[in-house]
Amino acid sequence: MQLDVIQTGLKEVEADALVLGHWSGAPFGGDLAEVDILLNGAISELAGIDANAEISGKRGELILLHTRGAIAAKRVLVVGLGKRPEADNILLQEASGTAVRFLREKNLTNIASALHRSHRLRGKGSKDAGPDPVKSAEATVDGAFTAIWEPGSHKTEKSGNSSAERFIVVEPDEGRLGAVTNGAERGRILAESANLARTLVNAPPNDLAPMALADQARAMAGEVGLGCDILDEDAMLRLGMGSLLAVSAGSENRARLVILKHTPLPNGPAVAFVGKGITFDTGGISIKAREGMEAMKGDMAGAAAVIAAMRAIVLLGLPVNVVGVAPCAENMLSGKAYRPADVVRCMNGKTVEIISTDAEGRMVLADALTYAVRNLGAPRVVDVATLTGACVTALGHACSGAMTNDPPLLEMVRRAAERAGEKIWELPLFSEYKTQIKSEIADLKNSGGRPAGAITAGMFLREFTGEVPWVHLDIAGTSSTHESRPHLAKGPTGVMVRTLVELASELSQ
Ligand code: BES
Ligand code: MN
Ligand code: ZN
């Protein structure tokens, strides 16, 4: 979809439809009032005089009117924004996505939007901080580009909906044009990067084995100007990455360690992002139940989030050094597969007794974390992983689990997530849980059993971060959604891409 920011009046913009926002309970004002007058009261007429009003402004409401030559746009789509005090950027993002998906279904592919102008950001403390043109333009463009992503890439017969071709942000006010253009561009970079993560997660595991995932990362890096190193299994062996290699041993597809670098500054990295990249998780010898195993093609959503966030960070030109690390492997069964009772030696020298070969995520992350801290010199690390079913049991699909050895860093990640509109919730790493991963024969067990399964996985990872501040984000419940929403297709969500970018952005200040 093409993005344009155009300085023109609402009357003049040519499009299949012009999208406007409407607050419930508020008198018609601003753009809505202006267009209403141009349309001879066609919008206000719908507000009616009784309870049967066709237009109320409630959240998600869509009213499509034909303009019949009164303005250059052929139609006006009025999107309900709900009550004004509830206003936030997520609301605007959803409203924009809802409008775009609705119009696309009607094959209206040339969309103009003044939605960003309906926004009033409520600053904390002040009654009304006034509209922030950068943030509101970002939210509407992000919402629009997020909305057009669909999972049916391998269908031979394309769906009836033609995809939207052009999204025009209309800004009559010259004084706001620069800010709106910046925000719009930022929104597009974020959404297109998150869509890359979704496309990678959605890819079938026969198309996206570890080497193919590494190739995708390398190709992307070349396009946008990221540094990229890819380690093969020989290199991993030389580094002593015994836990990563143990997971990969059962597969015909060789593992890769992807390292992406954004280093605009002469000094070392400010942060490393580490993402679990299991391209398919059968569980290995501790094989998973057959029902639902297909969902395990998405077990590389952490790696996808890291790769996509690195793309956004370089395209936004953030003045901060960031490295991304993605251990990519496939967890299969064969005569070469690792087994329960095996003891493997990790890169940092710690030995691990395998209890379950299905607890493979922490095994690949262990060596990747060591690499990030020791070889890349990261002074802080954030890992993202579809790590445990227990996290889904604990928190469901509403938020990602967060664990840390450093409360201030978690606080920073929490702020970033809030700005990104993504929810995280802390689970405690109390020392009481440590006994669950103690082994008789080795330093650690790779599974602490059922109780507090998300936490014991976090406790395990903590053993590989040294003294470095670290946050672990378990996205097992949030990386995919089972229902489509008016603004969002079902399937992979691209979760944590925006949070990681916001974090990098905060570290750049
Ligand atoms: N990839 C799974 C976790 C998962 C489950 C992600 C459901 C998304 C949805 C992970 O590798 C796994 O199998 N974890 C085990 C750990 C256990 C063996 C200690 C689990 O959660 O059961
Ligand atoms: Mn597993
Ligand atoms: Zn897994």
Image (cartoon, rainbow, N blue to C red):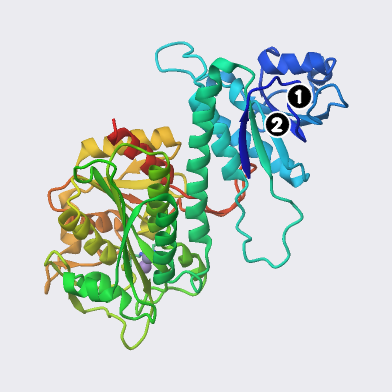
User: Which residue is found at the position 66% from the left and 14% from the top?
Assistant: 30
Would residue 176 appear left or right of 261 to someone viewing this image? Answer: right
- When the figure is inspected, residue 319 is found, relative to residue 301, above or below; the finding is above
Residue type for callout 1 = Ile
Q: CA distance from mark 1 to mark 2?
A: 8 Å
Q: Quadrant of the N terminus?
A: top right
Q: Residue furthest right?
A: 68
Query: In the image shown, does 438 or 270 lie closer to the viewer?
Result: 270
The dot on residue 55 is 1
User: Which residue is found at the position 47% from the left and 69% from the top?
Assistant: 208
Q: Residue furthest bottom?
A: 335
Would residue 349 appear left or right of 25 to someone viewing this image? Answer: left
Q: Residues within 10 Å of mark 1 (few under 14, many from 20)?
A: many
Q: Position of residue 312 (x, y in %)?
A: 42, 44
Q: Position of residue 79 (x, y in %)?
A: 69, 29
* Residue 447 visible in this rendered orientation of the protein: yes
Q: Position of residue 373 (x, y in %)?
A: 18, 54
- Mark 1 C-beta to ligand 1 under 8 Å: no
The dot on residue 61 is 2
Q: Quadrant of the C terminus?
A: top left
Q: Position of residue 261 (x, y in %)?
A: 30, 52
- Which SS class for mark 2? loop
Sequence-wise first label, 1 or 2: 1
User: Which residue is found at the position 54% from the left and 33% from the top?
Assistant: 184
Q: Are marks 1 and 2 in contact (CB under 8 Å)?
A: yes
* Residue 88 visible in this rendered orientation of the protein: no
Q: Residues within 10 Å of mark 2 (few under 14, many from 20)?
A: many
Indicate which quadrant contains ligand 1: bottom left
